[in-house]
Amino acid sequence: MRHFYTFLLYMAMPLVLLRLLWRSRNAAGYRDRLKERFGLFDPFGAADTLWIHAVSVGEVQAAVPLVKLLQERYPEQAIVITTTTPTGSQRVKELFGDELFHVYAPYDIPLIIKRFIKRAKPRVMVLMETEIWPNLLATCKQHGIPSLLANARLSQRSAKGYARLGNFTRQTFGDIGWVAAQAPADAERFVQLGVHPDRIVVTGSIKFDARLPRSLNEQADVIRRTWGHERPVWVAASTHEGEDEQVLQAHKQIQQQLPQALLVLVPRHPERFDSVAALCKKSGFEVVRRSDQSNCTPETGVFLGDTVGELPMFLAGADVAFMGGSLIKHGGHNMLEPAALGVPVVFGPHNFNFMAISELLLEEDAAVMVSQADELAAVVEAWLSDASERSRIGENGRRVVEQNRGALNKLADLIDDLLRVAVDKSAVVNQ
């Protein structure tokens, strides 16, 4: 079955390249460094590397505390991070500069993966969250490179989809070396799909361990001055197509009761910045774009966060946060970011990517879930009008985050073990 899958990938490659070119119309980075996606890049010059694959900005952000901890434990160990999107690549460069190596991830074709392995020389491969690629896992296994699915989550919906592929799924999941699962429910789904129970460790989510920059509060105070200190401000973070309309509808309702309320709207994908700006104006709002570096006026209804990497600052500066990808069937985004800041968070019903975390926040009265724009408007308006309730919900969120830290050290210890085994094997081979 995997050979048929590989054949289909070869046949689809022209379409894959056309899609890259199509996406590059709005994001030029998709056509840059194209050779890297085929495993063509200059060797790093390191004897071996620790390979961490993080798809885009969200996975890169999740990997930051892990990378920092590994750099402390193994200062001489070369680390390579791969991403698949230009925004992920940009974020790696902003966060780490020349501290580690970065290239785009290879396509899931054996020849390309082998070329990548020859140049990158990975000792251990760490895949962040749900990156499951059949040929990548099989090829690493063939080359004796242990793989670890870190901070792993698997929703019931995704598990059902994988299960439909029968033996192909069991073969693929059986090639995963180790799984560090976020929750027991995730672990059980991995077992059902073919991962041996002895190869799964429930560590919790490392997103609880993310540490905020010391300068964040200062940055938030600066951005708040550009918005207007006296204005009630709510942020809609990581929104998607079909969701912005609902957020803007909610903001209109909020402004009927709180005319000075400001919406900070941050679309998930940079290629949508212009279209979302146009949508805001069409909806009757005066818009200030972050990229213009202009202050809001009393007439400004929407501040558009059209930059990459500044969402934590926007969240820290806001009074209330809505996490996107949840009013539509996308699966939601990381609601721990505002919770860790003590900012009350509201989200929609579609959070299957963060099921355990969303349920925990709801159980601890640290968040509210809504199903439509009217409900979103009501919750945000109530919180913006009541500083005491905002503070209570926000502090509950901060407490939940603090109480659930610890996954990072468990995950790093597991990587320690894999690196140690890899070193021992290498020593035996070289004797």
Image (spheres, rainbow, N blue to C red):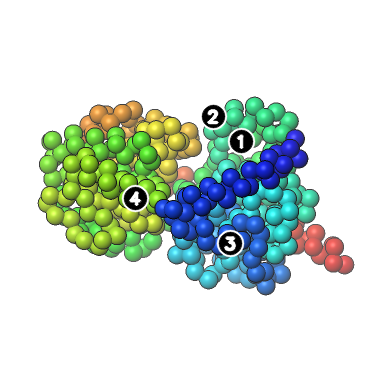
First in sequence: mark 2 vs mark 4: 2
Query: Which marked residue is nearer to the observer: mark 1 or mark 2?
Result: 2
Residue under label 3: 103
Left or right of 324? Residue 158 is right
- Amino acid type of disc 1? Ala
* Image quarter hosting the N terminus: top right
First in sequence: mark 1 vs mark 2: 2
Residue 405 on image: x %, y %: 48, 48
Residue at image x 31%, y 45%? 276
Whether tag 4 and tag 3 are in contact, CB under 8 A, the answer is no
Residue under label 4: 273
Which of the numbered marks, if any, corresponds to residue 187?
1
Numbered disc 3: secondary structure: strand
- Determine the CA span between mark 2 and mark 4: 30 Å
Residue under label 2: 157
Query: Which marked residue is nearer to the observer: mark 1 or mark 3?
Result: 3
- Amino acid type of disc 4? Phe
